[in-house]
Structure formats: C-alpha cells, structure tokens
Amino acid sequence: MKACCVILILASFARIVAIAQPKPAEADDVIQSVEQWAQDNLDDNVLEALRQVDRDRVRAFFVALEKQFEGTNVYRLVPLKDAASQLLPLLHEYEETEPFAVWLQTRLDYLDTAQQLERQVTVTPGQPDAGLLSRPSPQLERDAWSKTLEQRPMPPKAQKFVPRLKSIFTTQRAPAELVWLAEVESSFDPNARSPAGAAGMFQLTPETARNQGLSVSWLRDERLDPDKSARAAAERLRQLHHHFGDWRLALAAYNAGQARVDGLLKKSKTRTFDAIAWRLPAETQMYVPKVEATLHRREGITLADLKMPKG
C-alpha cells in the first residue's frame, strides 16, 4: 500500500520537470547527494517503489527542489508547494525519514509565503511572464512574513529549550534572542536533517560544525546535541556579525555562506542586505525576513534592537 502511495506521489511530481531542466554538469552533485540519501535513509519498501518509477522523474523533482531554493526567483518556489505537501505525510510515516519530514515541514512556510507574494504581482496584459521577471522588494517580503507569523503559536518544544539555550547564547557572547533561529530552522527539533546534509536544531552543515569544533562522524554527530549545537550556532553568529557588522548580512551568510555574501557585496560595491537580496538564493531571501518576523513575534524586537552581551 505504501509503495503504491509512493508511486502516485512521485507521478504527481512530473509537472515540476518543466520548472527546472538543469544541465547534467550542474545537477550531478545534487543527483548524487539525493541518491545517496535515498540509499541511506529510505527503507526497503520505499526503495523498491522508487526502482519501479522512472528514475529521471525522481531526479527531476529533487533537482527542481534544490534548484529553486538555490535560484534567485522566489516565485518559482510556488509550483513546488503541492508536491512538497504530498511528500510530507510519506516522510512522516517512516522513522528513517522523519528527520527529513521535520526539515521539510519548516520550509513549507517558504512556499506559502512565496505564493502570497506572487498574488501581489501585477501582470501587464500581453506579458504573461512579467510577474516571474519582477522581484518582490525586501520590505515586501518582510511585510509578508510578519503577516504569516502574526498569529502563529510557539512551537511545542520551545518552552523546554528556550531558557537553557538563551543561557548558552549569552555565555557565547551572542544575543540571547537569537535562539529563535531554531524555530526557523527546525521548530526546535534536534533531529531535523536536510537532504543536503545540514542537521540539528540549528541546521549546521558538516563544514560549519567541524569549524566550530563539533564531531560529525556517523558514530557521534554532535550537531544533534541541543546544547553543543547551540554553542556552535551562537559562536558562528557572533563571528559573522563581527565580520559584517550587520545582522541581516550575518544571517544571510549563516544561511547561504560567508564567501557568497562577501562576493556579492564586493561585486555590488555595497554593504547592505537589501542591495544584494535579489542576487541571493531564494531560500536566503526568504530566510532573513522570516528570522526578523520570528524575533518580533516571540520577543517584540527588531534586529536593530539586538545587543551583544558584555564579557
């Protein structure tokens, strides 16, 4: 029954193929990562179902998902919404894929908010693609996220973790309020894992985790430890703020990588997030204002209000 469900869901992804047709050279790393993820994390029944489905179709969905998060057009996230919603229950069914379900659940917001933004686009008659060519301004995205989160209750696990994580952030000389980054990344679930390899409550990549002194071996992945993950995230955020002197840029670098943000700032000859936002990955464009809206919802503050602890 489950195998049949997999086939039906994957078949519904066929329409996504038209969204992204990457060149083989561009997609190789993503495809290899996805196939390894499937081999490592899907149980035998699911794997058997996948073998009965057109491999190109399966690849196309995952490549499209990755490509649109890495692309710069937030509107292209919208067609992924239905497919992601159909995939989510399946991921929740299997213990092996539950960490990926947690990751995907937190990112459905990006697809919903992208749809909200798309509805505000004015298309000129005779130019059907005009909406896709335009870009929502950073302020428009901030307004959209404020609306998305204005009535959202606190994640169930937040009450357990927030007090102790705030203490850790303060000890690491990072603003305590930034613990709410864990709501954006994982809804405070230490087991969250992305198909691209980030893991833990603060979604640390293997490289970032190692640089912050954490073990990421298969025997002991310290990213799954809430306290150690929080220390590493706080330290990294403090380093990025020291480097950029701006919280929006620091958050963009936390999500997209410091080198990418540095390169865009240099190319644009500017020092503001808003000036480079449209060149950042769509996920990052959405991530920074989501963090801002979350801080305002949970703490009633803006990024400008954040203060570094003394000591």
Image: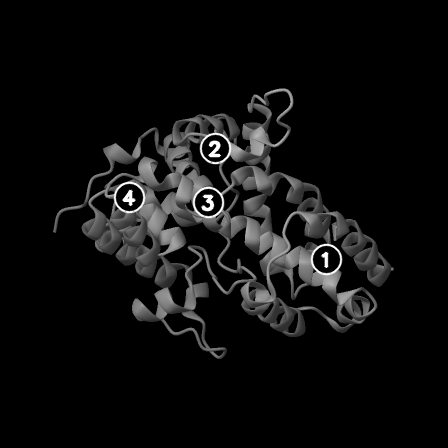
Q: Give the label, 1 or 4, closer to the camera.
A: 4
> Sequence-wise, which precedes: disc 3 or disc 2?
2
The residue sitting at the left extreme is: 311
Closest to the observer, 126 or 137: 126
Residue 69: x and y in percent read: 53, 49
Q: Tag 4 or tag 3, which sits nearer the N-term?
A: 3
- Quadrant of residue 296 within the rendered picture: top left
Q: Residues within 10 Å of mark 4 (few under 14, many from 20)?
A: few
Determine whether, in the image, residue 113 is placed left or right of residue 304: right
Judged from the image, the secondary structure of the residue bearing numbered disc 4 is helix
State the image coordinates of residue 291 (x, y, percent, origin top left).
40, 40
Q: Position of residue 97 (x, y in %)?
A: 65, 62
The reply, left or right, for residue 85 in relation to residue 169 is: right
What's the amino acid at mark 2? Arg
Q: Earlier in the sequence, mark 1 or mark 2?
A: 1
Q: Which residue is mark 1?
A: 93
Q: The residue under label 4 is which amino acid type?
A: Ser
Q: Amino acid at mark 3?
A: Val
Of the numbered discs 1 and 3, the one sitting upstream in the chain is 1
Q: Which residue is identified by label 4?
A: 268
Q: CA distance from mark 1 to mark 2?
A: 37 Å
Residue occupying the point 68% across, 62% down: 59
Sequence order check, earlier mark of 2 and 4: 2
Mark 1 or 3, which is nearer the eye? Answer: 3
Q: Amino acid at mark 1?
A: Glu
Residue 103 in view (yes/no)? no
Q: Is residue 249 visible?
A: yes
